Image (spheres, grey):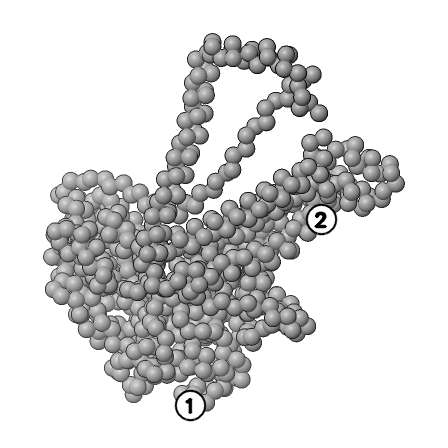
Amino acid sequence: MTIRPRSVRRGIGFTGLALAGALTLAACGSDDNSSGDDKKSSTKAAAAPGAEAPKGDCGTGKLAAAGSSAQKNAMDEWIKAYQAKCSGASIDYASSGSGTGRQSFFDKQVTFAGSDSALKPEEVAKAGAACAPGQAINLPMVTGPIAIAYNVSGVKDLTLDAKTIAGIFSGKITKWDAAEIKALNPNAQLPGTAIQTVHRSEASGTTENFTKYLKAAAGADWTFDAAQDWKAPGGQGAKGSEGVASIVKSTQGGISYMEQSYAENSGLGIAQINTGAAAPVKLTPEAAGKAVEAAKIVGQGNDLKLSVDYATKAEGAYPIILVTYEIVCEKGTAADKLPLLKSFLNYTSSAEGQKVLAGIGYAPLPTTVADKVRAAVAGLS
Amino acid sequence: MSTTTPTAPAEPERKAPAAKRTKVRPGDRIFSGAARGAGISLLAIMAAIAIFLVVKATDALSKNQGSFLTDQGWDPNTAKPAFGVVTLVFGTVVSATIAMLIAVPVAVGVALFITHYAPRRIAQTLGYIIDLLAAVPSVVYGLWGYIFLAPKLLGLHSWLSDYLGWIPVFDKEQAGVTARTLFTVGIVLAIMILPIIAAVTREVFLQVPRAHEEAALALGATRWEMIRVAVLPYGKPGIISASMLGLGRAVGETIAVAMVLSPSFDLSIHILDPGNTTIAANIANQFGESNEIGRGALIASGLVLFIMTLLVNGAARVVINRRKAFSGANS
């Protein structure tokens, strides 16, 4: 008779959901740099005679930042250029999304956050707690035009206005040869194909700014909320600007909104906007800059929160723009981070830093705004 | 049956390990301590994660102005958060069901072919290829799904709605030009879970006792009859377990669904129209721009997925246990 082995008890396995994206960013303490002058002054500004340009103005150490993915390309360029200039500095920008960036800022995991929207009233207290005893401020830094990109064969230089765009994206205008579009484009050969609208499937600042434009400029023709999620029925959603661009490219009659660089890289047509000004406005960095210039500063003191007038009729101003901010502590940044933070933001808001933007699909800040940003950066303590 | 073991011979045997236990060597003690510590720390970590998730979720749920179970919509980041999980649950269940309906029969067929039909060399190569499929990252399936597969499935969509449109599920309400629908998602998921199910079922079919198969053949069964009476009944618990593994991947699949599906929060039973969304895809789409309540809401939806998975796994376990008695697995 053999004894059977005791049956092994079976436990029920649990599976864990680990949603935690842990941002552990080591903070290397660094003492004030005095000998941080570096030798290889690669910038043209510094090469000019009488170079008292921001060359000795180098911070050292590490800086962690996170937030808006719309800023990613700009930040990448800036960080590359800044680190080439200042060898002792290491800056890390995680493009995790504005909401995550702001949360990381509240949790003091990052020194500044990139955000597609300024701090909301209910967030100001939280941000203040992270900056105690100071306050958090919004600094507009990266602005860019949002292109209305379309794929209609044989149609170039399409002109649209806010009412028509609202009609298209709310599903009221369904054919490319609709009377509304014809009226704006008397000379174009518009086909009878159906309009296929594409929007972002995930929450995004681009959607928020685009719907803000529609709400402000199209009035009664756009009845949906301006939000990060697409609220209008119909159309198809695609993930990310690259997803939206690729769907429009592969869909005859497709139209969507996206950052300029994605529309250009995919070879899509970009509509010009009839704002009510004398001539329809083509999308250019300067035209977007004009719209930023027309924006009012609604923040107090050094808080440079902007209120964009999307319904602007100013000559040559392209009204569909995305304004993104850096959220920083006006007072209360850790002393070991402060020199680097100030130096980096001073660079990004300088003429030299802003010039980089035009080449990669953004619009440089108008000088009036940039001056104020630099003044605010100088006042950080 | 050895249930009525005589007590006399059992006594000394039971004493023997007890006697051994008195002189435990340090190595044993260290090992058992380490193993116990590992087990306890796992439970502690699990408990910590569960508590964290539940706290975050209840926080958001208490601020929800809408009904979490029935609301169609997801607005947790506004001043008046309102979000509901019904569309997400529906999309998750439907896409996973489609995936299972397609993948399980095909996977069982593949496994049977490899174990019982294919010449040995082909069987081996095929086995390798299937294992390889399981290693393809899901983002690749997502890219392939929305760039290549969805446009190709447009024809199938209109065919289905033309001929089966009288069934409400196959009715197309939007004269859409896109096949980025729950149906397509189900097909992509089916391809993703196929290798897992096929690989596990193949192993199970290889375990079928040779005696069972030969007995069936000796009774005059054809090969198909042998498979039906000997292989499939024996493998049933294994097929169910394998399907559960596949189902786990299907309901939890995130990025591929997020890329392929054109989502909306309005519940629609028309699976050939773009719309609906799944729990996991919604988490991927919303996480980046969520504030604290938004994140809590997503965690709450994740807990719903967790509960769904537990229920399905529990049901599967019941089925497996009931089948075990008939399968001959304990022979």
Identify residue type, mark 2: Gly
Q: Do the numbered discs 2 and 1 sit on residues whose CB atoms are within 8 Å?
A: no
Q: Amino acid at mark 1?
A: Ala
Residue A290, given in percent of the width and then of the height, sits at 25, 75
Mark 2, other Cα within 10 Å: few <14 / some 14–19 / many ≥20: some
**How far across and how far down the image is residue A114, in percent?**
27, 57
Q: Is residue A26 above or below residue A115?
A: above
Q: Classify A318 as above or below B326.
A: below
Disc nearest the viewer among 2 and 1: 2
Give the SS element for disc 1: helix
Frontmost residue, A267 versus B264: B264
Q: Which mark is residue A183?
A: 1
Q: How many C-alpha atoms fall within 10 Å of the one at disc 1: few (<14), some, or many (≥20)? A: few
Which chain does tag 2 point to?
B
Picture layout, residue A213 above or below residue B330: below
Q: Tell me, yes or no, whether dots 2 and 1 are on the same chain.
A: no
Q: Position of residue B199 (x, y in %)?
A: 64, 42
Residues B280 and A211: in front is B280
> Which quarter of the rendered picture does the N terminus of chain A lie within?
top right
According to the picture, the residue beneath numbered tag 2 turns out to be B109
Find residue A134 and report its image quarter: bottom left
Marks 2 and 1 sit apart, C-alpha to C-alpha, by 60 Å
Counting from the top left corner in percent of width and height, residue B124 is at 70, 39
What residue is shown at x 11% (from left), y 57% (from top)?
A379
Residue located at (61% from left, 53% from top): B100
Residue A318 found in image quarter = bottom left
